[in-house]
Amino acid sequence: MWRPVELRVRSSASIIGHHIRTDSLTGTTASLTVLVETDASGAGTDEPAGLETDTVNVGTDKSAGLETDTVNAGTDEPAGLETDTVNAGTDEPATLETDTVNAGTDEPATLETDTVNAGTDSPGVALDARLTLTSPSGVAHIFSFPVGTPTSLTVEQAELWWTHDLGTPSLYDVTIELLGPDGAVLDRLEDRVGLRTIEIDRSPDPEGGRLFRFLLNGVPIFARGAAWLPADMLLGSVSDERYRSLITLARDGNMNMLRIWGGGIYEQDAFYSLTDELGVLVWQDFAFACIDYPSDDPVLRREVTLEAEYQVTRLRNRASLAVWSGNNEVQLIHGFAYQGYEPGNWGYDFFHQILPETVERLDGAVPYWPGSPWGEDEFEGWMAVNGVRDGDRHAWEVWHGFDFGAGGGPYDEPGQARHHRRYANDLGKFISEFGIHASPALETLQRWIPAGHLSIHSESFDAHNKDHPKNKGDAVLEIVTGLPTTMREYVDFTMAAQAEGLKFGVEHYRRRQPHCSGTLVWQFNDVWPGFSWSMVDHDLVPKSSWYALRRAYAPVVASFAETAGGLELWVSNSTPSPVRTTAVLDLTDAAGVVLGSREVPVELEPGESKRVWARSERLRTGAWAWVRSHDNTFPPNRVFGGEVRDLQLTGEAPKWTVSRTGATTASVTVHATSLTYQARVSAGVPGARYSDNYLDLRPGDEVVVTVDGLPENFDPATIVVETYGS
């Protein structure tokens, strides 16, 4: 029997997007713009929609028909059927025709849908949103406003989001409720947001050119961090726990920024939740890298627009998001090839039109930067894209050995052209990429390369190195450490060369604050267990460079600069507070015997870096200078004359004792009996974490290293102390 079925529409709507943006800060008051977007259209109407066939008859005044074989067959009850389809544009009731609908009854069947009757002649009813922002201290701020329109709000006594080094990364709990005309809650959304402002200061630099520095809540910061790569080649295998382990290592390494490289991916939500929580800023490249793109192709233009709209909308509420960058090295490589950046079919419209317009339209608060690197300076011409007078730059003079814009040279030997001392020529404003290769831990290599294939430059060894040529680093090792002959030496020598080189570079750039305002090392992590520029290997084992940079990335750092005529001591303050302390300076001979000491008063303003001591005599080869502070304002540091290979090391291992302090923790007391370079505590398991490691010790020095993450019921005898080359 064919029977008509009336379609009754239940009014409903859902939240499909939201944006909570901090526009400005006045004292402790935050001014916000809030937008709640819904899928509602004509909500609140009781007009029926028409539905008669398998396809909705949109834009007609006739009823639509839908045929089905069985709907409530054999019952006297009306048929109930829920559908998301709406008979838009009709004034007629919906009719459902079927072979068997409510068979045995003369009553019409009823078809119900939750979808709003869009396009009806009945007027729509405006919906409201109720926003509750609950601060970390428990204060609730409640606002109501219409959906679909940006609304200005203020939060008094705002608890601001800061990077972990400047304060607390405070996050507000967010509840958004969508309210119907009768006040009923139609939908609900929960989130966490941080209240903060972020901008890039490009004001004139008295040194020449323009600054490039981030202002967080109006406070200038020195960005200290590294480039983030996908956490595994198998993207779907990355667990939330792996994200937490890696980002915690970044925070504990005194990093306040990670740069998501444009050759990687837009990261999972878990990544950004953790950077929000742990107080680490994110430099986000759009996913373009290293080639020209056919930006005149209309299909590709649409894909790029849709991708940008999706990702900007997805990430715009993240407190840790500091900048959207158009790409990685597209302009750099295009400029080197064509000596210019004129508009054309190479990606220009993507990076200078589509992407910035999308960021402004859908976000409006996080700054956009055309690419990494990028700069605009008439004096430097087409080289300004990686120049030293404006913007950010990639400092690949070191390691690759070519002039990428910082000058230096010429050099007679490849090793000298690639040597880390070349960083001293670089006067860049923000160094967003620079790096040096090093091996993973020997235990990591042993887990991934069969013993019979694990030898220097074996076929398997070189297959795990994706740089070219495979022996590029050997020319540097020959100068810094000497060439290794065993795998143990290769691991130690490359780690030492990387640690000394990155330490040298970061200290140089920090001494230039505020003319230089950031260093992001290439690279933080590894996508697979190979030889690379990473400071944390694939098994999450920090290399020597991670510990060296944790000291160099401390908020206040003391560092030595060797000049043509002598030696200088500098202190750099990257905090928003003045520094008043005393530096204790020791000069020792090649055996670590103290030749002289002095105390140096230190007074620095916020963001200041200055020389506090100097002498007109260079260190002799193998001699050392050491610095510390009585009140631990900055971590201990040192410099030695010459190269690592010039150090007069006895090879005598320190004495140590191990005490169990818990089921998975231990305390290791290390006592040096001679000058010791890069003493390291090792438990031989990748999950172990050390309070410090790769330590330089003078005769008689004693340090305590705590270890956690050990296997339950571990054997203390398996924890050993090793030294460089041992």
Image (cartoon, rainbow, N blue to C red):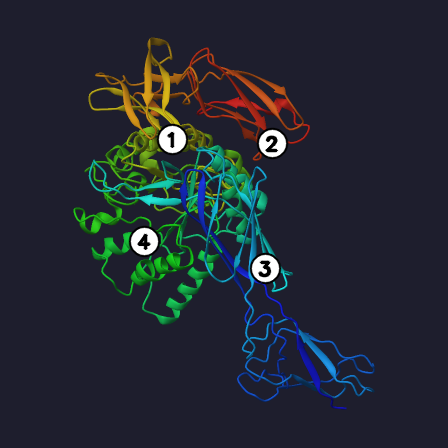
Asked whether the beta carbons under mark 3 and mark 4 sit within 8 Å of each other, the answer is no
Identify the residue under disc 1: 576
Identify the residue under disc 2: 709
Element type at marker 4? loop
Identify the residue under disc 3: 178
Image location of residue 219, percent across then percent down: 37, 37
For the question of whether residue 452 can be seen, the reply is no
Question: Which numbered disc, 3 or 2, marks the residue that appears first in the sequence?
Answer: 3
Give the distance between the C-alpha atoms of the residues marked 1 and 2, in whole angstroms. Answer: 34 Å
Q: Residue furthest front?
A: 182
Q: Amino acid at mark 1?
A: Pro
Identify the residue shown where x is 83% and y is 87%.
Answer: 104
- Mark 4 Cα within 10 Å, few/some/many (few <14, many 20+)? many
Image location of residue 466, percent across then percent down: 41, 47
Image location of residue 1, percent across then percent down: 77, 91
User: Which tag is nearer the camera, tag 2 or tag 4?
Assistant: 4
Left or right, 159 with respect to 330, comes to: right
Identify the residue under disc 4: 370
- Mark 1 Cα within 10 Å, few/some/many (few <14, many 20+)? some
Element type at marker 1? loop
